Structures are given as structure tokens and as C-alpha cells.
Amino acid sequence: MAEQKIELDAVIVGAGFAGLYALYKLRESGLSVRAYERGADVGGTWYWNRYPGARCDVTSVQYSYSFSPELEQEWTWTEIMAAQPEILDYARYVADKFDLRRDIRFGTTVSSARYDESTRRWLIRTDQGEVLDARYFVMATGSLSTPNTPQFEGIENFQGPVYHTGLWPEDGVDFSGKTVGIIGTGSSGTQAIPVIAEEAAHLTVFQRTPNYTLPANNRPLPPEEMAQVKRDYADIRRTQQEALTAMYGFGGRQDAPPTLLIKETTEADRMRALDEHGFFAVRLYKDVAVDLEANEMACEMYREMVRRTVADPDMAERLLPRGYPLGCKRPVIDTDYYQTFNRDNVTLVDLRRGGINAITATGIDTEQGHFEFDVLVAATGFDAMTGSYLGVDIVGRDQRSLRDAWAEGPRTYLGLQVVGFPNLFLLNAPGSPSVLTNMITSMEFQVEWMAECIAYLDQNQIRSIEAIEAAQEAWIAHVNDVAEGTMHTAPSCNSWYLGANIPGKPRIFMPYAGGYPRYKEKCREVAAKGYEGFRLSA
């Protein structure tokens, strides 16, 4: 008996911000579309990352959709940088406003996708037994959505609960009266630590690599200020479109581009800059981004600010980032992170002074001693950029899997397609600006480019589109060229941009560092030339 297939024009994996807009845009184009989401609701990253203190590091008026002026006027943000619950409410509002839920299947994981060369269509299967037959397959699974689960020896022996910041319980966690251990001081750890410390009886922080983090300077967004934003939205969006990172300002500040050269300053100059600007003084100098000697001078300024903030000199010394440049990793923002280490109920274990041996029934055994607690929190980040794409068993032409195609590192053309995988579109993938930009803005552009591409194919009776090998290789070379000389690819830099947080993952710089405007220009140029670099099959 032949298996029952559901025929669609397009299948989308993921109902985060990219998936929602892709569903909206392709449905608006007249296509039959369905999205599949493993979570119980929309929101993607903001559905799963419910850990204490979770909030966006982009100002909310910019980290929002621009495709609907009506939506811009209807939605009111309450903070400069909204917390996770408010961002999730926004995603839910969008889904309801545009009636997107009727075409989303929640609690469903897409397990495999096979390209049928005879029909030039994708055969897609879910864990609920559905078999989908679609012309287009869209992976909108996000850059930071596959948790990096720690593989510590003995973790199964721990008698208390273990939580990962990227898979937080929907009902939250009550830390009252509990002793808590948290591993990791990246973005999620930096945000969670101050909040957990306020609630827990005692918090022990296991720090693997101290991070560079800047104060969020978050605050409520008064109604009159939000009203002015709504009046100015057209100008705000225009500014975003012209900005290197698709956003302007940082931490609620509207900072001018750096103009000074740190190597031309004296120590007295730098100390005065710290007095006036605090941690943000390191952003005053333009040579810090391209000159390792200049960068180290800025790092020392940063370390001086940590010493000024943390009362105990030994505690401050353990918190100082060393051995890698400022700007190597994604910037982290915080609310009272360093001030938290002035609390009596917080202990810092600097694992550079002796690492973890094993997890025990009651805590963590390290080379510095044994530390006991009731609850363990893993703030160990994600298998970034590639984890969510490789989580689906995708097989293209000639029975070649995406996992094999990316065995030596991810390769894409424009961060949108991969050689050997016709009609497969990736959103926020390696080779695109994605995590180096305001992701909603850059993703909107990608979705619109994809929708225009599909319309072009239909108008010209073209059955499939696939990246050409030479174009893909040229794009990868360009991605590497524009990253060369930046702090992202410095020899001492080990970041998730490079896959360095996952054992055995190929070391390759994944996002496009050439800037959002330059990326848009290239994509538009490709389209204007009849989708140059792609093979179009009638």
C-alpha cells in the first residue's frame, strides 16, 4: 500500500522569527505552505531560552519586524531591551495577528528530508508519521537552538536536578533556599548568574573562560518615548538598513563610530576615559578591532574596570579575561554581573586554576577541591550555526547528506543554498551575516530574497534552483577574506563563531563579517543577473 503523502509547495522547519516570516511571506505569494515546530508554541530561541535574566542584546525597537507598519504601531515595548517573556509575547502576537498558527504543526520534529531527483521535489518525514511532498524545503531552525549538552564524567550520578539554560522548564525553577552550581559564564551564564544569586541560598560559579561583558544600561521605555519611536519608525528602519550590523547604538546608547587611536593615547588618557565612560571606554578606539597590540591595550583598560568594580582583589583577578582579544567572541551584555561577585552568597571557581574532574552525587569534584550544591545549571551554550541544520537528516542529489557535505566545515552560497541540494533554502545559515547583525533585520531580507527568487522561478517555468560549485567556493573564499585581520580570526581566538566550543567540530569562521549592506548588495546583484551562480533547471 502506497504511503499517504501531503503535497505542499513549501515546508518550513522552525517557528521562530525566521520561520514565522517565511510562512507569512510564502503564503502571501500564493504558495501552499506548512511550518513544523518541535516546541509547543512559536518563538524559537525565545520559547526555549526561559532561564532567569534572559533578554535580548539588541534594543527592542530594532529587534522587531519591519514588514508591517501596522504591527509597528500596534505593539508597545516596555523596556529598551525586552526580557524573554515580552519577546515571546511579541512572537505570539505576530502569529495571531497574521493567522499563522493554522499552518504550523507544533510538538512535531522533522526527522528527515530526501531530494527526489526524478520529481525534483523533497520527501520530508516527521516524528508524528507525516510524509510531506514539497517543492521547496526551508530550514529556519536558528543559529543558536541546539544546546551544547555538557559531557562531564559522572553527570548521571548527580542526585539533584540538572537544568540547561537553553532547555529551561516552562514553569521556571524555584531556587529559594537552595545551593546552586552553575557551569559557564558566556551570554546565558552572565545573564542568569545575578538573578539566581538574588534568590539562591548560595551560588557557586564554575568559570571556564572569563568573558568580556558590557553593562546593558537597560531601563523602562516610557510611553512618551515609545510614542516618539512609533513616529520615527521609518527613519529608524532606514538607519538599520544602512548600518554595518543592521542596528545602531549599543546597550541602549546611541554611540558614534569610534574615531580615536588607542595607540596614540597615554595611560593617563586611558584612565580618564575609564572615569568618564566606564566599561564603554574600550569602544572609543577604532584600531582595537584590527590591531592586536591596540586590542591588548583596550583589554587592559577593561581589566582595570573589573578591578574597580569587584571589591576583593583576588576575586577580581580570577574574573579577568586574558589570552584572547576583545571582539573575538560575540559581545555579551549584563546587568550587575561583576557586582554580583561582591555578594557574600557567591563563590567563584576559576577552572583555569584547576579543572573539573567529575560530577558526583552531591556536586562537582575539581582539582581545587569538591564543591557541593542542591541544583546544577549548565550554561554551556549551543552547537552554534550548524547544529540545528545537521539535526535533520537531509539528503540531496546523489544520495549525499548535508552532514557529509559539511564534514570539513559548512559551505554555502550566500548563506542561502548548498551545492547538491536543489530547492533547499537556509535562513541565518553559515555564510550569511546572521549572528554578526540584528538577526530579525538580516533575516527579513533573506526571506524576501527567497520569496522573490521563487516568484522568478515560477514566472519563468523553472523547476529547481541549485548553487553552482564555483560560485559556492568563491563565496566561501570571500567570507574568509573579509574575516581575515579581524579579532574573530585571531590565532588566540576560540569562539563558537569558529565552532571551537564543540569537540571535534571543524574550525572554520562561519558568519559573514563583511557587513549587512555589503551582503544585501551582493545578493541583489546575483538576482539582477538572473541568479548568477545558481543552476536553474526548467
Image (cartoon, rainbow, N blue to C red):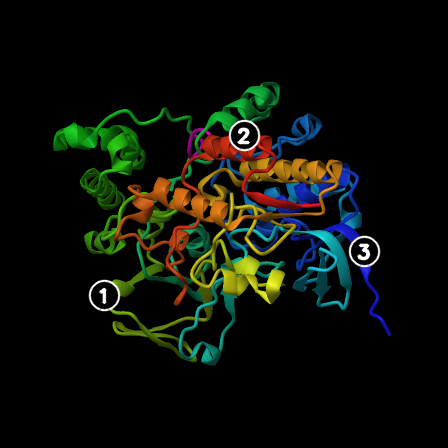
Query: 382 and 446: which one is in front?
Result: 446
Q: Which mark is residue 7?
A: 3
Q: Which residues are magenta?
A: 246-252
Mark 3 or 2, nearer chain start: 3
Q: Note whether 208 is above or below 517 in the view shown.
A: below
Quadrant of the drawing holding the C terminus? top right
Q: Residue 433 in the image: x percent, y percent?
A: 48, 41
Image position of 507 (left or right of 425): left
Residue on which disc 1 sits: 353
Mark 2 or 1, nearer chain start: 2
Magenta span contains residue 238: no
SS class of the residue under badge 3? Answer: strand
Q: Note whether 221 is above or below 139 in the view shown.
A: above
Q: Disc 1 or disc 3, which is closer to the eye?
A: 3
Marks 2/1: CA–CA distance: 43 Å
Image position of 26 (left or right of 164): right
Instruction: Residue type at mark 2: give it.
Output: Leu
Residue on which disc 2 sits: 221
Q: Note whether 196 is above or below 518 in the view shown.
A: below
